[in-house]
Image: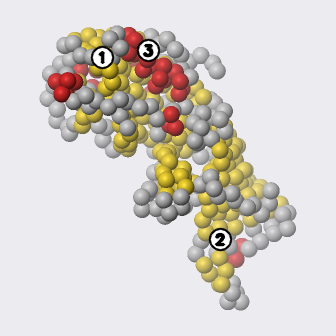
Amino acid sequence: MKELKLPRNIISVLFATITFCLFMPQTTFCQTEKLDIVEYTPPKGWTKTPKEGAVTYSYVNQTKTGFCVITVYASTASTGSPSKDFTRAWNELVVKPFKAEANPKTEIQSSDGWQAIAGGAAFEEEGVKAYAILTVFSGFGKTANVLGVFNDESLVAQLEAFTQSIKLDKTAVAANPAPRAVVNSDRQGVSSDKLVGSWATSSSGTRGRDPSGNVLNSGYYKRQYTFNRDGSYSFKAERWLGYLKANEYWMTEEQGSYTIAGDLLTVVPKRSITTIKNREGGVVRTQKNELETTAYRWSFHYFEGLQETQLILQTRAETNRDGAFASSDIFPNSYLLSQKYNPEWKFD
């Protein structure tokens, strides 16, 4: 991996806004929210995902290539040393999941009994470059963390606006002991044990009749992702368009890389080809597909009726690769994939 550096102005600008707004009285015109001792104004229009001991706000731009994830962690007991608090949080939240440098440059500011330490670093996985900026607040026996992860410098203004709204409530430290922040290892880094493996789904179209009046299914679409521990993935799909084109089977093979930042799973294809075959397996033609880099909000959900945990991928718009969204009232704009379902391919 080549060495990457965080643009110099980013950490300085963000820390300046933290310093100015954290330790100065403010008049708040927007609706604020609070997690434990950290009060802030949530970014408008972003996706909010509550977690145990934390809350995440995520945004993906319209091109689906730029993202920013902000996570606010509830306070935990301080080590008694702000620098040790930062080192512990940096190793747990940045070094382990993203393989970032262990000793980033930091900036420090103290006021009103609180000390804030901010540090940032760039990291890269399979050619995808991103940045992580962590701010650790320590004081009154507590420490709290705010982590921003993004891959597009144009989103710094959004991160800046968020940090500008942060205030700490020292009166709540003694009155309301906070729950311990828990890092969800399933959403940190590429080597998530639960994500690694094959996940598949299938769907079928409406029913119809052939020219003789026989009732036939009008098509199906099977697809399967395989996520590897090294950050690579493969995608395989088989589509039959139904009785109107009964002699055509569309077989898709795609390979690429994926990265995880918070609750965002970003898939970056490097090669995608569809081969159209006839019933006998003869190749009719092949075509290169558009490479769709897509960021999904990902999670796991246990369905009691099916007695299985499925992978949920949510995104703003349907993709050509994934096809139509699943019919789910619980998870709108989503694809539901199972490890129990093993597609039977017409052609290997």
The circle on residue 219 is: 2
Residue for point 56% across, 18% down = 4
Q: Do we see residue 40 in this rendering?
A: no
Instruction: Kindly identify which residue carries mark 3.
Output: 87
Q: Identify whether 308 is placed above or below 265.
A: below
Q: Name the residue nearer the viewer: 224 or 309.
A: 309
Q: Name the residue nearer the viewer: 44 or 33.
A: 33
Q: Amino acid at mark 3?
A: Thr
Q: Residues within 10 Å of mark 1 (few under 14, many from 20)?
A: many
Percent x, y for residue 89? Answer: 42, 20
Q: Quadrant of residue 238?
A: bottom right
Q: Amino acid at mark 1?
A: Ser
Q: Identify whether 235 is placed above or below 94.
A: below
Q: Nearer the viewer, mark 2 or mark 3?
A: 3
Q: Name the residue nearer the viewer: 231 or 140.
A: 140
Q: Element at badge 1?
A: strand
Q: Nearer the viewer, mark 1 or mark 2?
A: 1
Q: Do we see residue 194 in this rendering?
A: yes
Q: Amino acid at mark 2?
A: Gly
Percent x, y for residue 237? Answer: 68, 56
Percent x, y for residue 324? Answer: 54, 61
Q: Element at badge 3?
A: helix
